[in-house]
Amino acid sequence: MTSASILVIEDEPAIQELVAYTCSTQGFTVRRADSARAGRDAIDRELPDMVLLDWMLPDKSGIELLKDLRSHDRTKVVPVIMLTAKGNEADRVVGLDTGADDYVVKPFSPRELIARIRAVFRRRAPEHSGDALEYGPLMIDPSRHEVLAGGQAIKMGLAEFKLLKFLIGHPDRVFSRAQLLDSVWGDHVFIEERTVDVHVLRLRKALAPVQAHGLIQTVRGMGYRLSTRPEQ
């Protein structure tokens, strides 16, 4: 199961409980908030991998909170799914135009909600979708916490597994050490940037027996990327 974190911002207790239970049974780590302010505070404390956001909140509309999230660098790329009873076309357009990744109309079935969550993760953050990820000779099975190359299992530590899973979800993109720390370890965890170098070295050593260590490339002055292309 995936351990991606989801923040549920919903003021109706029954719906909040249903959404939280549905997500937790699928392996997601769930936090809850019952107002826009509480949701913003929760995001400030720890950036979630996804937000499920009710439109009608007691202190401020979900749309206003969504606008706020999309206006800041730290939160503008966090996937957001709107949960709302507003089902007409005009409201859906407003939600999507404001920056929502999807729009789920109440009442909805738990199966539909999970399907939409996974679909958004596949588009925006494949490493959290729970699906197997493949790149070059490598295949990651998140449900088994397993990395394979040509059917051969590759042993590595948890941090290296999480780092590789993230990079495979975003191939050919260069990430700074700070970005990797935030994305893999979480922006609420305070560790030195050189820690990334240590785990990249360990990951390369783990991949060396299957001749895949060259996939993890250093981009001088910038950071690291996963690529099958020769280093510049």
Image (spheres, rainbow, N blue to C red):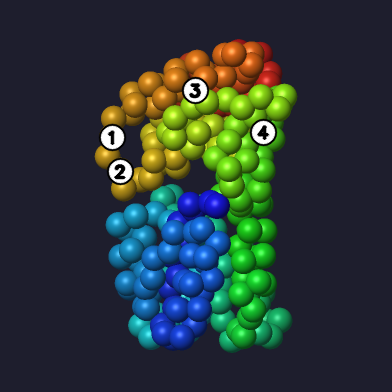
Give x and y (percent) for residue 208: 57, 14
Q: Amino acid at mark 3?
A: Leu
Asked whether the residues under the numbered discs 2 and 1 touch, taking CB atoms below 8 Å apart as contact, a structural biologist would say yes
Viewer can see residue 66: no
Q: Residues within 10 Å of mark 2 (few under 14, many from 20)?
A: few
Disc 1: which residue: 191
Residue at the image point whose x is 66% and y is 40% from the top: 133
Secondary structure type for disc 2: loop
Give x and y (percent) for residue 55: 51, 79
Secondary structure type for disc 4: strand
Q: CA distance from mark 4 to mark 3?
A: 15 Å
Sequence order check, earlier mark of 2 and 4: 4
Asked whether the residues under the numbered discs 1 and 3 touch, taking CB atoms below 8 Å apart as contact, a structural biologist would say no
Q: Residues within 10 Å of mark 3 (few under 14, many from 20)?
A: many
Residue at the image point whose x is 56% and y is 76% from the top: 83
Q: Is residue 159 above or below residue 91?
A: above
Q: Residues within 10 Å of mark 1 (few under 14, many from 20)?
A: few
Q: Nearer the viewer, mark 4 or mark 1?
A: 4
Secondary structure type for disc 3: helix
Which label belongs to residue 139?
Answer: 4
Sequence order check, earlier mark of 1 and 3: 1
